[in-house]
Image: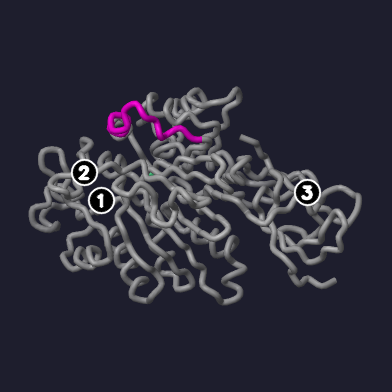
Amino acid sequence: MSNEIIRVQYAAKPETNVYQQAEGGRPINKILLGTWAGVVKDDGRERVRVITAGPDGWIRRNELRDNPGLKIFFVDVGQGDGMLVETLDKRLLIDGGPNTNLRRYLRGYQYSYILRKNERVRIDTVLVSHFDADHYNGLIALFNDEQFEFGTVYHNGIARFHNLKRERPAGYNTDLGKMDNDLLSTTFSDINDARNMLQAGGLQAMFRRFLEAVVNAHDQGRLDSLSRLTTQQATVPGYEKDKNLSIEVLGPVPKLVGGQVHWPWFGDSSHTRNGHSLVLKLNYSEGGQQGKTVLLGGDLNTEAEAYLIQHYGNSNPFMVDVAKSCHHGSSDFLVEYMDRVKPFATVISSGDNESYAHPRAEAIGCAGKYSRGERPKVFSTELARSINSAGDVLYGMINCRTDGKQIIMAQMKERRTGADIWDSYKI
Ligand SMILES: [Zn+2]
């Protein structure tokens, strides 16, 4: 039988059955809403023949659609955050984790079909929530990978300098730069700033390697631009309100002094750089309907959440359908903030063998308590990760899929029973 693809479609049901036969029989696999299916035979009957990433087979034609919708892959990067976001025409990375997990996932699985053709994988947009190792170290090797190319890399504009004051540029009294009267005035934005900072020296080693990777990729024509993102932009450029995927920028909120971006100091360096994480509200809709929303808030902490609540006052832009738990399920959160987010489902991204005890019991408890719905869902990459009976490590990917009308969350079962492979929930 010919395996020439006559059209590309995507699963339309939360779990779409793949059958072995054109008629009758039990399903041999189930694929999640939005999963790719290459149609290779359509003779007008109820089922069409497809090839998939799993076993090939037959799918009901009315259970396929032409748009994959929004797919968010919360990749199990261990103690850190790393998310891949896909729509019909965009690929985004939001953070890159502390290690090579995300890159290995992209190379070895998600985009192996592109690399096999010897083509470059294009990531349209990269959003770095803040410059802590568990959010950006994994991006350095990816930027240095010549089989990848990138559009714009957005970041919060807060750089990292040497721990020792004498090693930093003159006048920088903190490892984030110059701070006066609880306002940090050192910030950067574009490739020219990156070049200047590399020239001036005094950078923290990992941050220097990050800037070098960005500049090198740019010089090789594989990376378009670098740019600071704050609430001065209402939405991420290219993801405005009229697009299927719009991304609202709810944080960081800078203080403008003489028109210049400054950052409120949240007690210490760590709280300041975490607290000014990018806070992004994704809204996916098709055809002007209201859509479904997801909030990704980096590593916000108590001080930052109080600052954001004060900034937004009586308006509450934070309420969403699905939220990533801030700071890997740390205890450093405000109940009042969680109560504003009030999602139906929460995702916690964290690792084993770390000294923070993430996710903390009270963060898990509050994620459930300050949710909407009778049966709130709390997902954890750390819980989803396991070892199967054959001894393979099953990484704890958490999947979020929406077509704008329905939104589902799913994780793979540790062991499949026939076609039953997903632990999935309609939110
Ligand atoms: Zn973190």
Residue 75, x across and y down, in percent: 52, 50
The image quadrant that residue 214 belongs to is: bottom left
**Label 2 close to label 3 by CB (< 8 Å):** no
Q: Which residues are magenta?
A: 307-320
**Label 2 close to label 1 by CB (< 8 Å):** yes
Q: Residue at x 78, y 71 (%)?
A: 3
- How is the protein colored in the picture? one colour
Disc 3 designates what residue? 17
Disc 2 designates what residue? 263
- Some atom of ligand 1 lies within 8 Å of the CB belonging to the residue at label 1: no
Which one is nearer the viewer's eye here, 257 or 133? 257
- Can you name the residue that lies furthest to the right here? 24
Residue 274, x across and y down, in percent: 31, 42
Residue 379 lies in magenta, yes or no? no
Q: Residue at x 54, y 34 (%)?
A: 345
Q: Residues within 10 Å of mark 3 (few under 14, many from 20)?
A: many
Q: Residues within 10 Å of mark 2 (few under 14, many from 20)?
A: many
The three-letter code of the residue at mark 3 reads: Asn
Real-space Cα separation, disc 1 to disc 3, in angstroms: 47 Å
Secondary structure of the residue carrying numbered label 1: loop
Residue 227, label in figure: none
Q: Earlier in the sequence, mark 2 or mark 3?
A: 3
Which one is nearer the viewer's eye here, 64 or 20? 64
Disc 1 designates what residue? 158
On screen, 381 above or below 38? above
Q: Earlier in the sequence, mark 2 or mark 1?
A: 1
Q: Earlier in the sequence, mark 1 or mark 3?
A: 3
On screen, 275 above or below 57? above
Secondary structure of the residue carrying numbered label 2: strand
Which one is nearer the viewer's eye here, 375 or 316? 316
